[in-house]
Image (cartoon, rainbow, N blue to C red):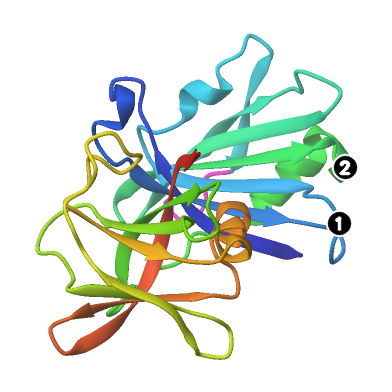
């Protein structure tokens, strides 16, 4: 069953020191039962993203989907486990919506999946039409844990202008925990490449929740003019402590 879906930023080797905010990658985790360990990871990303993550000598070309209805054969690479804690991996380029998309499945040892089992999952998958985010804003997330009880922060960043006017954070009941405006980023911080950053002061348990599960159970919104819009968060992959 699907356990968690999140977006995180792809940081390319050619972009050191977080000089730019990376492109969003979709990650989904699957489990066999509620509360169980992750068995299979699904990754979807830009076509030129991640194939080098699976470039080992122990891999085999496989047919993900045979040719059918005028569509050509779709091939991928099956990568064998590199250690006892890993299961097999499989990646391919999906020609969805006229653009190639990188797709990968990575099993853990808890999945007890062999290579044919993982390939069977891939062969059962079908491309779907990409849904619009609607009015939601795509903003980046970083966290800061402080030695001071009043120093914990959840940072929400905009990659480009125009900037939202304010950001606010609410709990599951709808109560607003923190609200602040967007400012210029700190030159030494995780989000220094952003166009603007909102630093939301929060209790320790809240910043921990955002660091572990990208804020599951909380709601982030940004005000643009007179309208509060939902925010879809991209984990920057960077955090700070003091």
User: Residue 61 at what x, y percent from top left?
Assistant: 61, 23
Please tell me which residue is depicted at 29% across the width and 71% down the height of the picture.
180
The magenta span reads 66-71
What is the secondary structure assignment of the residue under circle 2?
Answer: helix
Label 1 crowd bin: few (<14), some (14–19), many (20+), radius 10 Å: few
Can residue 72 be seen? Answer: no
Mark 2 and mark 1: Cα distance apart in space: 9 Å
| Location of residue 72 with respect to 179 vertically, above or below | above
Q: In the figure, residue 236 lies in which quadrant? A: top left
What is the secondary structure assignment of the residue under circle 1?
Answer: loop
Query: From this viewpoint, which residue is outermost toward the top?
Result: 57
Read off the residue under disc 2.
110
Please tell me which residue is depicted at 22% across the width and 47% down the height of the picture.
185
Please tell me which residue is depicted at 83% across the width and 28% down the height of the picture.
85
Read off the residue under disc 1.
36
Q: Nearer the viewer, mark 2 or mark 1?
A: 1
User: Residue 74 at what x, y percent from top left?
Assistant: 51, 40
Do callouts 2 and 1 mark residues in contact (Cβ within 8 Å)? Answer: yes
Q: Camera-side residue: 185 or 123?
A: 185
């Amino acid at each position: 069953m699907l356990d968690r879906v999140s977006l995180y930023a792809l940081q390319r080797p050619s972009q050191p020191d977080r000089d730019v905010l990376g492109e969003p990658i979709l990650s989904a985790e699957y489990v066999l039962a509620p509360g169980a360990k992750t068995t299979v990871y699904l990754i979807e990303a830009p076509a030129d993203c991640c194939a080098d993550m699976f470039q080992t000598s122990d891999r085999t070309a496989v047919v993900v989907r045979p040719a059918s209805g005028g569509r050509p054969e779709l091939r991928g690479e099956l990568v064998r486990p590199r250690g006892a804690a890993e299961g097999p991996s499989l990646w391919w380029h999906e020609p969805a919506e006229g653009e190639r998309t990188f797709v990968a499945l990575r099993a853990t040892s808890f999945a007890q999946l062999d290579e044919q089992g993982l390939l069977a999952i891939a062969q059962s998958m079908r491309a779907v039409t990409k849904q619009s985010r609607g009015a939601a804003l795509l903003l980046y997330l970083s966290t800061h844990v402080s030695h001071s009880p009043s120093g914990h922060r959840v940072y929400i960043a905009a990659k480009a202008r125009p900037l939202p006017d304010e950001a606010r954070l609410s709990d599951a009941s709808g109560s607003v925990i923190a609200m602040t405006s967007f400012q210029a980023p700190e030159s030494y911080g995780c989000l220094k490449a952003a166009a603007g950053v909102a630093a939301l002061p929060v209790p320790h348990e809240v910043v921990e929740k955002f660091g572990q599960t990208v804020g599951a159970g909380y709601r982030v919104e940004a005000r643009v003019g007179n309208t509060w819009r939902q925010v879809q968060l991209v984990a920057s992959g960077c955090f700070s402590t003091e």
